[in-house]
Image (cartoon, rainbow, N blue to C red):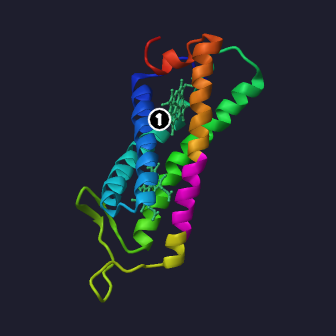
Amino acid sequence: MEKKSISRVEIGLHWTIAIGIIGLISLGIFMSNTRSFSLYDIHKSIGLLVFAIVVVRVLVRLQKGWPENISEGPAWEHGVARVVHWILILGTIIMPLSGMLDAVMSGQGLSIFGLDLIADNPGNNGRPQAIDESMAEMAEEAHQLTGYVLIGAIVLHVAGALKHHLVDGDNTLIRMLGRS
Ligand code: HEM
Ligand code: HEM
């Protein structure tokens, strides 16, 4: 099922998640590369909040279907755009789930800005101890790999949006900005 108009709720969800995901990818890569452990809790807390918004977005998509294409253009282009939308949606689900699995399996627990959702797993020395180290490693690799797939998909997605606007001169980007 496809429809021509995009509601304010869908537009709000799109831009909130877009900013959240781009911010979390940047923060995630920065904190991992610089080993800034003090940023991990902030990354995880924002990631959990973004996950809650992603769940709402997926429910809205399931209920309303994809927005209808308003542009002309070859079928293959629409096909690529649809595949990229699927990668983006699935990526926004896999990222927080793999991040949570990594955190819980490595014994860190889950909390949002200090509010405990799942307590950490204290070892003998009082420091968090892994619950399942190999699962934590697998989840960490999935988190990293999906992050890079998402970056590729976002680059294609933004290039597509700019092409619609600058080359084709259609309303695809304007509609997502809520101006049509
Ligand atoms: C919601 C979207 C999220 C995005 C887009 C995201 C993105 C990223 C990225 C790109 C990295 C750097 C990976 C690397 O280069 O090693 C990272 C690291 C990490 N993320 Fe996330 N993240 C998200 C949510 C979460 C959540 C919900 C948690 C946990 C509750 C989490 C926990 C972590 C941890 C622990 C690391 C460090 C892994 C390491 O030890 O290197 N992330 N994240
Ligand atoms: C900041 C740069 C971004 C721009 C300029 C942009 C632009 C757009 C535009 C114009 C559409 C409508 C396409 C159509 O009508 O067929 C769209 C849809 C979509 N975008 Fe983005 N977007 C951006 C970032 C993101 C990010 C970071 C994500 C996810 C990680 C994302 C996920 C989606 C999805 C899943 C759709 C399909 C419709 C929906 O579910 O809301 N976008 N975007």
The answer to whether 125 is drawn above or below residue 54 in the figure is below
State the SS at label 1.
helix
| Residue 1 visible at all | no
Q: Which residue is drawn at 40% across and 49% down?
A: 27
**Measured along the vertical axis of the image, is residue 1 above or below residue 116?**
above
What amino acid is at disc 1? Val
Magenta stretch holds residue 140: yes
Q: Residue at x 39, y 42 (%)?
A: 53
Left or right: 166, with 133 as reference point: right
Q: Main secondary structure of the magenta part?
A: helix
The image quarter containing residue 123 is: bottom left
Position of residue 160 relative to residue 141, above or below, is above
Most extreme residue toward the left, as rendered? 114
Q: Going by the picture, which residue comes out furthest to the front?
A: 34
Q: Mark 1 points at which residue?
A: 60
Can you give x and y, in whole percent of width and height, for residue 122 in the image? Answer: 30, 81
Rendered-image quarter of ligand 1: bottom left
Q: Position of residue 100 (x, y in %)?
A: 43, 61
Crowd class of label 1 (few under 14; some 14 to 19; many from 20; radius 10 Å): some
For image coordinates 50% across by 60% down, the residue present is 98
Q: Which of 80 and 34 is in front in this view?
A: 34
Q: Is residue 27 left or right of residue 168?
A: left
How many circles with numbers are drawn on the protein? 1
Q: What stretch is highlighted in magenta?
A: 138-149
The stretch drawn in magenta includes residue 38: no
Q: Is residue 17 above or below residue 8?
A: below
Figure quadrant of residue 14? top left
Residue at the image position 31 percent from the left and 59 percent from the top: 41
Quadrant location of the N terminus? top right
Disc 1: residue Cβ within 8 A of ligand 2's nearest atom: no
